[in-house]
Structure formats: C-alpha cells, structure tokens
Amino acid sequence: MSEELKNILAQLEQMNSKMEQVGSKMEQMDSKIQQMDSKMEQMGSKMEQMDSKIQQMDSRMEQMDSRMQKMDSRMDRIESRMDHMDSKVGQIAERTDSIQLRLENEVIRDIKIIAEGHIDLSRKLDEALKGKEERELILIRLNHLEYEVGEIKKNLNETA
C-alpha cells in the first residue's frame, strides 16, 4: 500500500473516530432532548394542575365574594334594625322621662293632698267615735239605773 492510501486510510479512521464521537454526542444530545421532553411533559402536566387549582381558587373566590355580598346585605339590614331600635329606645326614654316628671309633679303632690285629707277624716272619725262611745256608756248606765229604779219601785210596792 502506498503512502497515500495509508494517509487516506488514517484520515478515514480519524473521520470514523470523529463520526463515532459525533454519533456518541448525538446519542447524548438525543438522551438529553428526551429528558427535556419528559421534563417539559411533566411541566405541562404541572401547569395543567396549577391551572385547574387556579380555576378552583377562582371558583372559591367567587363563592366567597357572593357570601361576602350576602353578609354585607345582612349587616346593612342589621344596622337598619339597630338604628330603628335606637330610635325606639330614644322614644321610650323620652316617654319614661315624661312619666317620671308627671309622677314627681302631679301624682305625688295629689297623693300628699289625699293623705292630708285622710288624716283629717281619720281625726274627725276618731272624735265622732269618741262621742259615740261616751253616748253608749251613758245609755248603758241609764239602762242600769232604770233597772235599779224599777227594782227599787218593785221593792217599795212590795213593802207598802
């Protein structure tokens, strides 16, 4: 073999070696691309899961927003009722004050006047009863004396 052939053969072997290296690197790249594809699929799956979870969270947030609106509405009604009750309590307080003033100014004064009249009537009744008691005692004595006079007359008539 000639030198040229040896050179060509050496070059071919170098090329073959380089081709093997390129093939090996291509296989490594193919393996890495497959790994990247797998990771991309995993990322896609995780993205779909995240999208699903975000949709669930959106749904829950909408439900919470709806509940919050209902609670706001209820709170508005409660505040309205409380305002109405405050108004009623104010009216009751005014009426109570009015009644208390009337009691202090009129009823208590009238009770005092009636009590004074009652005391006068009680005193007059006591005086009237005192006279009646004396009259009853006098009548009892008179009856007793009439009985004794009758007994004395009877004794005189019998002796005479």
Image (tube, rainbow, N blue to C red):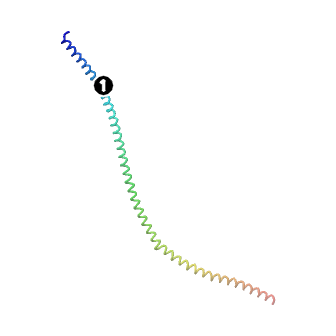
Q: Quadrant of residue 125?
A: bottom right
Q: Is residue 8 above or below residue 117?
A: above
Q: Is residue 118 above or below residue 38?
A: below
Q: Residue at x 28, y 21 (%)?
A: 24
**Residue 85 place in picture, x, y as percent:** 41, 59
Residue type at mark 1: give it.
Ser
Q: Residue at x 19, y 11 (%)?
A: 3
Q: Quadrant location of the N terminus?
A: top left
Q: Nearer the viewer, residue 102 or 34?
A: 34
- Residue bearing the label numbered 1: 31
**Residue 110 place in picture, x, y as percent:** 49, 75
Residue positioned most to the left: 4
Q: Residue at x 30, y 25 (%)?
A: 31
Q: Residue at x 36, y 42 (%)?
A: 60
Q: Secondary structure at mark 1?
A: helix
Residue positioned most to the right: 159
Q: Nearer the viewer, residue 114 or 67?
A: 67
Asked if residue 63 lies left or right of residue 24, the reply is right
**Residue 45 place in picture, x, y as percent:** 33, 32
Q: Quadrant location of the C terminus?
A: bottom right
Q: Nearer the viewer, residue 13 or 86?
A: 13
Residue positioned most to the bottom: 160
**Residue 89 place in picture, x, y as percent:** 42, 62
Q: Is residue 132 above or below residue 108?
A: below
